[in-house]
Image (cartoon, grey):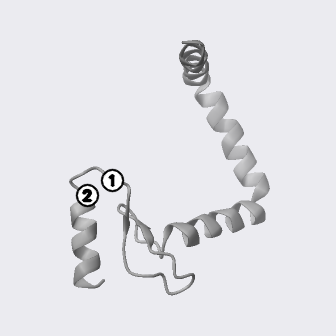
Amino acid sequence: MSKSNFMLRELAIPKGMTTFIGSPCRVCSNKVRRVSENTPCVECDRRRAREYRAKNKDACNARSKQWMIDNHEYRIAYQKSRRVSSVA
């Protein structure tokens, strides 16, 4: 990590930012990177996640279904709060 890239990341952390502008990615030349992760860049991370979901569709669907079952009350409360805020 170059010194200027390190400084930008270090400035983004105390401000509570989730991304920062760093050095260009070696793969796609995108400069937006996540503060919390050691990934090449945001775009490469999205591409990797899309490829994983495409290859492991059944496992991802099962995990999503299980989350919905485990968090039923949270989902209902969230949906109610969204209805109230969209009406106001």
Residue 47 percent coordinates (x, y): 64, 69
Q: Quadrant of the C terminus?
A: top right
The amino acid on which the numbered mark 2 sits, given as a three-letter code, is Ile
- Give the spatial CA distance, label 1 vs label 2: 6 Å
**Is 61 displayed left or right of 26 in the figure?**
right
**Is 67 displayed left or right of 16 in the figure?**
right
The residue sitting at 62% across, 23% down in the picture is 72
Residue 53 percent coordinates (x, y): 71, 60
Report which residue position mark 1 lands on. Answer: 17
Residue 45 percent coordinates (x, y): 55, 68
Residue 73 percent coordinates (x, y): 57, 19
| Residue 8, picture quadrant | bottom left
Q: Determine the secondary structure under disc 2.
A: loop
Report which residue position mark 2 lands on. Answer: 13
Give the residue furthest to the front.
88
**Is 51 displayed left or right of 85 in the figure?**
right
| Residue 80, picture quadrant | top right
| Whether residue 59 is situated above or below residue 51 in the rendered picture | above
Counting other residues with Cα less than 10 Å from the Cα at mark 2, is it few (<14), some (14-19), or many (20 or more)? some
The amino acid on which the numbered mark 1 sits, given as a three-letter code, is Met
How many dots with numbers? 2
**Contact, CB < 8 Å: mark 1 with mark 2?**
yes
Q: Nearer the viewer, residue 69 or 38?
A: 38
**Is 87 displayed left or right of 2 in the figure?**
right
The residue sitting at 71% across, 37% down in the picture is 65
| Whether residue 75 is situated above or below residue 25 in the rendered picture | above
Q: Determine the secondary structure under disc 1.
A: loop
Counting other residues with Cα less than 10 Å from the Cα at mark 1, is it few (<14), some (14-19), or many (20 or more)? few
**Disc ID at residue 30:** none
